[in-house]
């Protein structure tokens, strides 16, 4: 099944709706013309072309919904060609036979406006300009030129309607292009701002790890899904208050950042490290098969192996527990916290399980 982002899903749904309406309309108009006496051959060709092109689009969207906008561009171009060809035939017939165009021309102007609106909705602004001109010119120019040279038809109600639809009304679609572009840019900015806000709301600004809220949500999901053997680790930097008092808060911040970096380097893909609060961190990871404390011991060893700036060697205490199938959020955290407390009471720089 093809996964779509919200924007792609919106355009795919809208395209299906437009094409479904196009197919129904095309077949309905073709059926209506089949009941009329002596219809023009194009009265069958144009609506059936609309229906078949729309059906093709629906089938294509079923398999490739993410290409909805690309599809609508080419379908609108195909429909524009059908519309332009049929309009030209009616204009030439009117010139050569003396038949009044205002009495024979089908709803070409309305159909052209529908195409322009469809292009305005689905396509990027630059594409709308050139494709809109290709849609408008072959339909509007022959009809408007004919009417300007036949004042008796121009002054009829249908003639005036055609001039308005093909002239000022069509121009409005092009006038809206810059506004549509500005609106789209603003929406993109708002989406990026919202995404940035969501990221910031779930991240710790100092260490760039997940924060406590995001970690609790992930732990709750793991418990709810019973996602295999998982291990919860709580760690607390030893004597952190003394580090802040002796070296200052900037040095303390440097220690926290380095502790986060070293511990995160030992995690595998899909495992999570978060800043729990203050000098405490939490990790959610797959449980080692043979030695439950193996990962915590590796973190402890990594921390004490290399000095951190002027502070020197920094150690931490670890509380480790297995996430059980009957756990809830509080029970798992309570066991890990109790194990961490025993590690600190036992002399710090050690790991305890619970």
Image (tube, grey):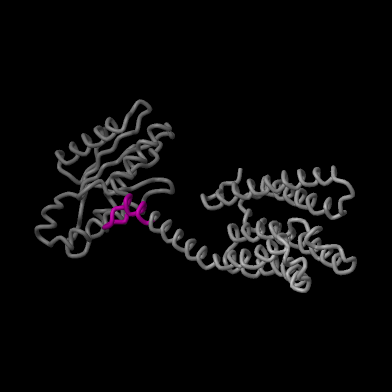
Q: Is residue 43 left or right of residue 72?
A: right
Q: Is residue 132 left or right of residue 32?
A: left
Query: Could you tell me residue 31's position as x and y percent?
Result: 81, 43
Query: Could you tell me residue 28's position as x and y percent?
Result: 76, 43
From where the camera sits, is residue 290 visible?
A: no
Q: Is residue 176 left or right of residue 155?
A: left
Question: Where, quadrant-wise, is the C terminus in this rendering?
Answer: top left
Q: Which residues are magenta?
A: 196-208
Q: What residue lies at 26% left-to-right and 42% top-to-bottom?
A: 234
Query: Could you tell me residue 40's position as x and y percent?
Result: 87, 54
From where the camera sits, is residue 273 visible?
A: yes
Q: What residue lies at 63% left-to-right and 53% top-to-bottom?
A: 68
Query: Could you tell me residue 318's position as x and y percent?
Result: 24, 42
- Foreground residue among 312 and 68: 68
Q: Is residue 198 magenta?
A: yes
- Foreground residue among 137 and 340: 137
317 versus 7 height, above or below:
above
Q: What residue lies at 80% left-to-right and 54% top-to-bottom?
A: 46
Question: Where, quadrant-wise, is the N terminus in this rendering?
Answer: top right
Figure disc tally: 0
Q: Is residue 313 magenta?
A: no
81 versus 267 height, above or below:
below
- Foreground residue among 174 and 308: 174
């Amino acid at each position: 099944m093809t996964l779509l982002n919200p924007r792609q899903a919106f355009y795919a749904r809208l395209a299906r709706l437009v094409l479904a309406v196009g197919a129904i309309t095309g077949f309905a108009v073709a059926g209506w013309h089949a009941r009329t006496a002596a219809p023009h051959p194009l009265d069958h060709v144009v609506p059936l072309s609309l229906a078949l092109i729309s059906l093709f689009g629906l089938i294509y969207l079923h398999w490739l919904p993410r290409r909805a906008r690309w599809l609508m561009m080419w379908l609108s171009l195909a429909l524009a060609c059908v519309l332009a060809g049929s309009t030209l035939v009616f204009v030439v017939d009117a010139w050569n036979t003396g038949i009044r165009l205002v009495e024979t021309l089908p709803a070409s102007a309305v159909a052209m406006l529908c195409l322009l609106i469809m292009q305005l909705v689905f396509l990027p602004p630059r594409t709308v300009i050139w494709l809109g001109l290709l849609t408008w010119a072959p339909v509007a120019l022959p009809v408007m030129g004919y009417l300007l040279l036949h004042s008796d038809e121009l002054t009829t109600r249908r003639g005036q309607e055609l001039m308005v639809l093909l002239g000022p009304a069509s121009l409005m679609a092009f006038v809206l292009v810059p506004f549509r572009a500005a609106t789209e840019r603003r929406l993109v900015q708002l989406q990026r701002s919202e995404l940035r806000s969501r990221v910031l709301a779930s991240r710790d600004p100092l260490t760039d790890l997940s924060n406590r809220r995001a970690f609790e949500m992930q732990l709750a999901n793991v418990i709810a899904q019973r996602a295999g053997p998982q291990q919860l680790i709580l760690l607390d930097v030893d004597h952190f208050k003394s580090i802040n008092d002796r070296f200052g808060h900037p040095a303390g911040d440097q220690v926290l950042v380095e502790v986060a970096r070293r511990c995160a380097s030992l995690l595998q893909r899909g495992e999570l490290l978060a800043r729990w609060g203050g000098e405490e961190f939490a990790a959610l990871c797959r449980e080692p098969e043979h030695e439950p404390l193996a990962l915590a011991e590796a973190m402890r060893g990594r921390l004490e192996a290399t000095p951190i700036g002027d502070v020197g060697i920094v150690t931490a205490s670890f509380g480790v527990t297995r996430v059980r199938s009957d756990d809830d959020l509080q029970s798992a955290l309570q066991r890990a916290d109790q194990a961490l407390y025993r590690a600190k009471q036992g002399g710090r720089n050690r790991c305890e399980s619970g």
